[in-house]
Image (cartoon, rainbow, N blue to C red):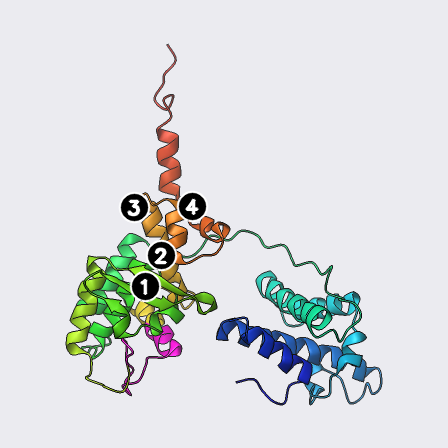
Amino acid sequence: MIDDKLPKLLRDYLNYSANLNKSSNTLKEYQYDLVNFLKFMKFVELKTIDKKKYKTVDDVETIADIDSKFLNGIDLNDIYEYLTYVKDKCDNSAVTRARKVASIKSFFKYLHLKARVIDDNPAKELESPKLGKRLPKYLTLEQSTALLDGVRNKTIKGREHDNRVRDYTIITLFLNCGMRLSELISIDIDHIKFDEEILTVIGKGNKERTIYLNRASMEAIKEYLCVRPNVTDTKALFLSERKTRISKRTVQNLIKNYLREIVGLDSSYSTHKLRHTAATLMYQFGNVDIRALQEILGHESIATTEIYTHVDNSQIREAVESNPLANYKPK
């Protein structure tokens, strides 16, 4: 739901983006980023009028009155001033600033080309911070099996966990199918084709995609369905304690708890790390073609999938040792 206290032009932009089938997560990011940006822009203007009253950005009470005249007054240097502010004062990483740049560029492009309420697009030449390539965090094969065994067979904090069959199934799907969190919670029972061993989910950008289920995934789902509460008013596969569709936060919390208590990993390992794990294990042990992996993960760009083509230290050593000169001794 779009906040009616936002500037009208921002509400119009968010409604426009929603009609382009942008995901709810993307819309939330757009709204968060642009509210913060506009709040900073208004702060800069107001502090020139009353420095005593407006000492920090938090002193700005509302941005609802921002209009096309105000937006026409923003130039490229103003935007870079904001990006410097979030870097130095808010400690935003390059990744976060890159996301903010994307939000700002999209917003001003809309204002200039679609709404036609600004004469020029000040963000047209806006550059995004360079991002260093980061290898994804993932669980090793040993950690993955320990996690599955721990959830399925052991007790948590001295007691048998009531939802362990459900949780085991959730983790099995993450580790075997590499699905996103949003895709997992959206699974409906009638979207599973047991005879074909496939299911359809709503992926990124509200796109429907097919996920193929292996034996472990099928067995876990069937076992969970035997103990799943008999609820007729929801088609959701995974249910919460209240017998409604399980929420993202619930899944995030249970995954973090299991990873900490069973595998001993810190909170930086999350549901998305299990997706990374599935992709890495498929690539390392399954000799999976990068194009096939792209399809499995639902990536639009092959460049996104290429982060999984990294090799670990053991593979590097094996490559060096395979050199035919590795055991050569001079005569």
Q: Which residue is mark 3?
A: 286
Q: Mark 2 belongs to which amino acid?
A: Thr
Q: Mark 4 belongs to which amino acid?
A: Thr
The crowding category of the residue bearing disc 2, from other C-alpha atoms within 10 Å (few below 14, some 14 to 19, many at least 20), is many
**Disc 3 element:** helix
Query: Do the residues bearing badges 1 and 2 touch, measured as CB atoms within 8 Å?
Result: yes
Q: Position of residue 69 (x, y in %)?
A: 80, 80
Q: Mark 3 belongs to which amino acid?
A: Gly
What residue is shown at x 24% (from left), y 63% (from top)?
148
Of tags 3 and 2, which is closer to the observer? Answer: 3
Q: Mark 1 belongs to which amino acid?
A: Phe
Say which of 153 and 307 sits in front. 307
Inspect the magenta stretch and tell me whether residue 283 lies in it.
no
Of tags 1 and 2, which is closer to the observer? Answer: 1
Which secondary structure is most common in the magenta stretch?
Answer: loop
Q: Which residue is mark 4?
A: 309
Inspect the magenta stretch and tell me whether residue 250 lies in it.
yes
**Disc 4 element:** helix
Nearer-N-terminus badge (4/1): 1
Name the side, left or right, on which 244 lies relative to 74.
left
Query: Do the residues bearing badges 3 and 2 touch, measured as CB atoms within 8 Å?
Result: no
Q: Which residues are magenta?
A: 235-254
**Disc 1 element:** helix
Q: Which residue is mark 1?
A: 174
Q: CA distance from mark 1 to mark 2?
A: 9 Å
Q: Which mark is residue 30?
A: none
Q: Which residue is mark 2?
A: 277
Nearer-N-terminus badge (3/2): 2
